[in-house]
Structure formats: structure tokens, C-alpha cells
Amino acid sequence: MSDPDNDLISGLRAGNESALRALIDRRSASLHRVAYRLLGDTYDAEDVCQETFLKFWRAAPDWRDGDARILTWLCRVATNDCYDRLRKKRPDLPGEMADYPDGRTGAEAALVNRERWDGLQTAMMSLPDRQRAALTLRYDEDMSQRDAAEIMGIGQKAYEALLVRGRKGLKALMQETEHV
Amino acid sequence: MSEDFGKLFKDSAAPAPRADLTDRIMAAAKAQTPLPAANDRKPWVWTALAGIAATLVAGFFVFSTQPDDTELWASEADAAGFGDLYSWVNDET
């Protein structure tokens, strides 16, 4: 099993801070996307990212090649952290949506995009946590079924079933609000 | 349908983290307890090995300094009447 972060492993094991910085630069956007989709709050998602990288930093000296890919490990720890946070405090639907991504062209296009973005995230937050995780790993991160199932700690068939239910639920929710 | 979802997620990308997230994580990592050197990360192994070695040495010392008390036990057995018992058994057979 080849790990695209293999080039950083020896540095991370040795406690090399530049290796940690390189890993954060490379993987923080992915982790943040997954955590954001699960939590619906960009600041909570950043906290999850920070905690996840710090856990990895502590575990790095004992990292064993071949056990898992670093990104898979990071995503698994981050999703578990998100589940814990969701259990402790069920979030309401996303609030003011202050962090809507930029890069829009024209006021009308911006409005349409904004509505669609709000609709997706609102619908996502209405889905069960694990269906939401299955969807974001597949569609935000483009992960293989095997990697996504490993991150979620379930078999591939169970992951596929979650994905099917998630797609069905998301479509129904989006149609209710006429975003699809 | 799968392609529709791919496009939907792509068009509705989650926000990126704030630009200073990397610096904040690095600062938190530096504030943590420093990582031990790779060759020094399991001090408990050496402690356990030292304990086992000390036990073995002490055990050897105790057993090697015990007096040979075979004769003492034989005389104690005679005093307790085992000699008569052996004689009676031998006479019977």
C-alpha cells in the first residue's frame, strides 16, 4: 500500500517540524472539508484539524509503515472527533454562513451559487452523521470505497449502503427545497 | 445520478480554513511536551529489563547460599518415628 505522504514519514518520526508543516499544508484543506461537512461550523472544523494534527504529531515517533496511509489515519481520527463533538452538542443548522467561498462572477451568479451552497449544506446537516461522512468522503474527497470504509471503520458493503441511503436522503431533502 | 452529486459537491465546495491555521497548529505543536528522541522513546523497556535481571541475580544468590539440610531432615524424620515405621514395613514384607 503506497502512501503519497511517504516522503514525510522519516522526518515526522524524527520530530522534524518542517515535515509537520509540510503535512499540514498538504492535508489540512481535506481534513477541514470533511470536518466542516460533519460539523457545519468552520471554526469547530479548524479545532478538529488542530487536534488531529497534534495527535498525529504525538503518535508519529511510533508510526509503522504499512499499517495505514497517513491521510486515512488523519481522516479517521478527525471523523471520530467530529462524532464525539456531535454527541456532546447537537448543532443547529449552519448559522450565518459567513465563510461562503469566494470566486463568484456577477451578483446573480453569486446569489444562485449561494442558494445552492446553502441548500447542500443545510440538507447535509439534516442527514444522519454517518451518511454525511460517507457522502463527503466520496464527493468532497473523491476517496475510493476501500479508503472511505477504512476511515469509517466499517466494511465496504456497509459503506456502500450508507452512501446509497445518503444519496437518497440528500436528493429528497434538496428536492424539498428545490435545489436539485 | 452519481455524476450529479459530484458536480453538486464541486460547485458547493466547503469553505477553506483560515490562512493562519498552519501557524496555529505549529505553535501548539511546539508548546507540547518535546518529542523524545527516536532511540530513547521506550525507557520502560530498559526499566523492565533491569528489574528482571535484578530478580534473577537475587534468586540465584538465595538458592546458591542455602545450606544442605538433607541430614537434618533425615534426623528429624527419625526423631518423629519414621524409622520405626520403615522397620515395620520392611518386616511385614
Image (spheres, coloured by chain):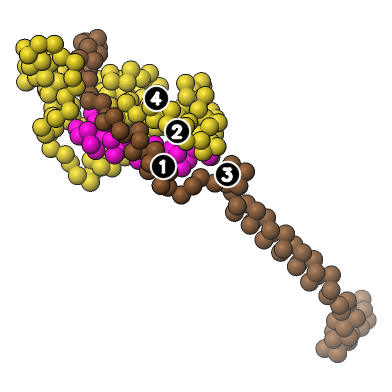
Q: In what element is the residue under mark 4?
A: helix
Residue A38 belongs to the span the image colors magenta: yes
At horizontal 20% and vertical 34% (from top left) the residue drawn is A41
Query: Which chain is brown in the rendering?
Result: B
Residue at image mark 3: B37
Pointer 4 or 2: first along the chain: 2
Q: Is residue A67 left or right of residue B70?
A: left
Q: Quadrant of the C terminus of chain B?
A: bottom right
Q: Residues within 10 Å of mark 3 (few under 14, many from 20)?
A: few
Q: In what element is the residue under mark 3?
A: loop
**Segment colored magenta:** A35-61
Say yes or no: labels 3 and 2 on the same chain.
Answer: no
Residue at image mark 1: B29
Q: Are marks 4 and 1 in contact (CB under 8 Å)?
A: no
Say yes or no: labels 1 and 3 on the same chain.
Answer: yes
- Name the kind of residue labelled 2 in the image: Leu
Q: Are marks 1 and 2 in contact (CB under 8 Å)?
A: yes
Residue A121 placement: quadrant: top left
Q: Colour of chain A?
A: yellow
